[in-house]
Amino acid sequence: MLTNKVLNLRPKLLNIIISIIPLSLILGNLATNINIVLICLLGIITYKFKIFKMEQKIYLYLLFSFFIYTILITLFNNLPNLYISERYEVHIFKSFFFLRYLILFLVINRHIDEGNFNTKLFFGSCSFFVFSLAVDILIQVSFGKNLLGLPVTEGRPSGFFGNENIAGSYLQKFSFFFIFFLFSYLPTKKTFYKILPFIFFLFPIILTVNRMSAVLYIASVLIFFLIEKKFKEILIFFLLLLVVVTATVKYSPVHSVYRLDNAITVFYKNSVEVIVHAPKLFWSNTWKDNERLFPGSSGYALIFNSGAQVWKKNKIFGGGFKSFQLNCEFIKNQTCNSHPHNYVLEILTDTGVIGLFLIYLIFFFSLINYFKFYVKIINSQLRFISMPFFLITFFEFFPLRSSGSFWTTNNAVVIFLMLAFLVNVSKLNSFNKK
């Protein structure tokens, strides 16, 4: 009897640990890593070798290939250099520790497949923390300090994240759980009430001055309405968007070097610069001695170019886990950083064409399966449940964007967690179950 109770308790405990991932992301890398390790350990204890079972084995083969390949190419490139610096030893260790995200994916997959995942609890947790962050940022901007007494740093409010300017990215992703959770319980045919939640989160995202997050958020809303064939909502949303941006830029109480109007102008110039020079990044690496490829560049074009030039040193196989900072150079038209600020460039520099092919093949297969499932859905609640996982995963893998490092804790958790959900979206329970 006691044994059965313990066995029944494990899936429930696993649901709780999975549901506090949004909180751990706010608390920082240590909390997130502890959370992920707990999920992996409890998942292995609960399901044992069953975590290696998948109905669609193509995902299993591709995932194992990507992770094993990453470790092997890291060993190949770093072992001969161990006597030079301890950094090479650290990179080898981290490539093995990165396997925790493979286990995370497998545990989530098995948990859903067994019918034990509590969809309502996860959506509720995400909704609570993202709504709290949005309100906290609005309070911080309005009164100079947030609920914890933290002030605005250099004109960039970040709420609970303190000095880390990543609140916009957090809102851009997790706000959709709140919005579609709300839609599932408050279905309405009135256009205004469908658009209002999207507009609500737009304010704090813009105020964080995280420009890429704002663009991705707006694009996500547009894609949702297009998929749902809500063309009237698209027109009204963009009209309200214009009003929101204008009012926020003009009346925002935040004033600093990161003024919103300046930030928008700079973002536009950076985007044009990168697009115009994009062909040179991949197809050219020599210029005249007196030529500067990016005159007056703010940095992104230089970093992207640096990533492209590092990739050219080992196009097929890559340089190994987080190898960009080991192989970049401080020379004309190039610079060094911890990563190239673009997932595609980073995966190319670290794992080459082979690694990029493997990980994006997983992404493309998950998209194909998702749309096959989506067109068959009649129940509106199931459509809303599936939408956040699709939107987040789609824009995480969207190649034409600046980003953090693919390998960092916060990004890797979101990528492989959402990918696991997207692959199994047809098996998720509705909110009236579990």
Image (tube, rainbow, N blue to C red):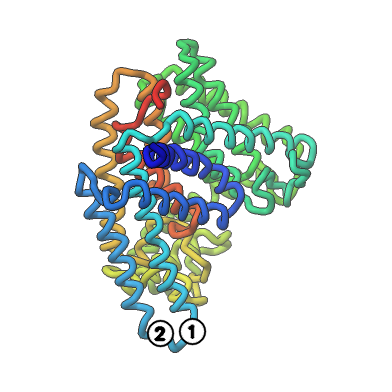
Question: Which residue is disc 2 drawn over?
Answer: 81
Question: Which residue is disc 1 drawn over?
Answer: 85
Can residue 178 be seen here? The reply is yes
Number of numbered discs overlaid on the protein picture: 2
Q: Position of residue 242 (x, y in %)?
A: 58, 28
Q: Position of residue 26 (x, y in %)?
A: 60, 47
Tell me the kind of residue under disc 2: Asn
Quarter of the rendering containing residue 200: top right
Location of residue 77 with respect to 261 vertically, above or below: below
Give the CA distance from mark 1 to mark 2.
Answer: 7 Å
Location of residue 9 with respect to 67 vertically, above or below: above
Pointer 2 local density, CA inside 10 Å: few below 14, some 14–19, many at least 20 = few
Which residue occupies the foreground of this view, 359 or 97?
97
Element on which disc 1 rests: loop
Tell me the kind of residue under disc 1: Ser
Q: Position of residue 352 (x, y in %)?
A: 31, 66
Element on which disc 2 rests: helix
Q: Which residue does the image show at 59% across and 36% down from the upper left?
A: 129
Q: Which mark is residue 422?
A: none
Pointer 1 local density, CA inside 10 Å: few below 14, some 14–19, many at least 20 = few
